Amino acid sequence: MKKRLKILIPIIVGLFFIYLTFEFTNPDERSLIYNYIGSAKIEFVLAAMLLGASADVIRGLRWQLLSRSLGYRSNKLISIASVFMCYTSNMAIARSGEFVRASVLSSYNNIPLGKTLGTIAAERVVDVCISLLILISVSILQYDLIIESLFDDEVLLYINENIGFIGLVILLFIIVLIILIKKINKIRRFFNTILEGLLSVTKLKSKMILFVISSFLIWTCYILAFSVIKFSVPELNAIDSSLIFPAFVVGVFSISLSNHGLGVYPLAISLFLVNFGINTELGLTYGWLAWSCQAIITLIFGALSFFVLPLLTK
């Protein structure tokens, strides 16, 4: 029952936000959104898709640096394919992709599963740190804009008012986890392999610069893929360029609420932009175009990876 709920809840959340999108728009506005999306210039849409795919390819190559730091050789094609398989799996079942990717990397490269999970966790830690740095940068550079748009949000106010309690819950969770690891040998051994993978970043040594450059390129591609959407529909020029970067940040932090941000991502961007006089249909057009470009790339290359990878390895 719990497993079914974990699968169903993110899907329901995504469908709920799609329903909200319909509620926030009338038939004329929806018709306008469809027309905007249908008239999008294909060259800019393809550019966004290419940049998004490039980010995922670089992510696959970056992982090889971590595996080599642990003394394991890995195939480039398998490393790249595992990234697309990860995101495709996340579209079907939320947060399942990391386990799928770890399993693929482990089985095809003969690397212990715990270590592949650890290296993927290390990547996630690095990416979270980068996304937080981006958030801090936006907050500093566009402080008034962020305050104006976000600090009325009830969730942020709740977190701000209950930060001590939330910190205590996290601390208790960590303590319980440490006790379990110490008491159960099998779990301890498995977590030790994960820890080794997690610490793989510290073993990069001379490759650390290449890892940092790769991380920078990944996020540069993501930002450019999001930014280029502005030029795909002439009406989107109404959105001031200063809003694009913070809108990207809003999208990044909303994407985990449902399966690959289904329904949530476009609505979050629209709600952010509407604070600055951008009408709902333009905000939703931008959000759905940005989301669709990444979703299409993920589905195409993910499906190919699931189908072709077993054949190529044989």
Image: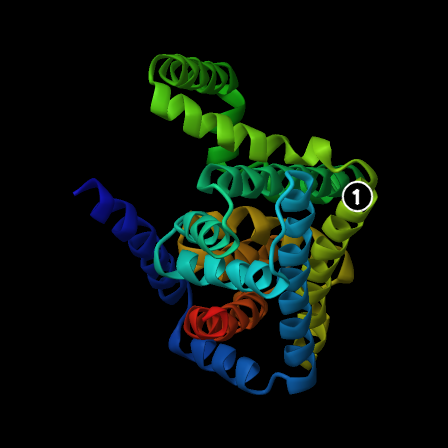
> 310 and 195: which one is in front?
310
Q: Is residue 58 left or right of residue 281?
A: right
Question: Taking the image as drawn, is residue 245 in sight?
Answer: yes
Q: Residue at x 69, y 41 (%)?
A: 130
Q: Which residue of the protein is positioned furthest toward the left in this rendering?
A: 1
Question: Taking the image as drawn, is residue 263 in sight?
Answer: no
The picture quadrant where one finds residue 234 is bottom right
In the image, residue 63 above or below residue 279: above
Q: Residue at x 44, y 74 (%)?
A: 311
Label 1 SS: helix
Q: How many marks do you count on the picture?
A: 1
In the image, residue 176 above or below residue 287: above
Colour theme: rainbow
Q: Amino acid at mark 1?
A: Lys
Q: Residue at x 80, y 48 (%)?
A: 210
* Residue 99 in picture, x, y percent from top left: 42, 47
The picture quadrant where one finds residue 76 is bottom right
* Residue 21 in picture, x, y percent from top left: 41, 63
> 305 and 51: which one is in front?
305
Question: Badge 1 is on which residue?
Answer: 207
In the image, residue 276 above or below residue 195: below
* Residue 71 in picture, x, y percent from top left: 65, 41
Q: Quadrant of the N terminus?
A: top left
* Residue 249 in picture, x, y percent from top left: 64, 49
> 206 and 243: which one is in front?
206
In the image, residue 205 above or below residue 213: above
> 223 and 198: which one is in front?
198
Q: Residue at x 53, y 86 (%)?
A: 38
Q: Quadrant of the C terminus?
A: bottom left
Determine crowd level at label 1: few under 14, some 14-19, many 20+ residues with C-alpha closer than 10 A.
some
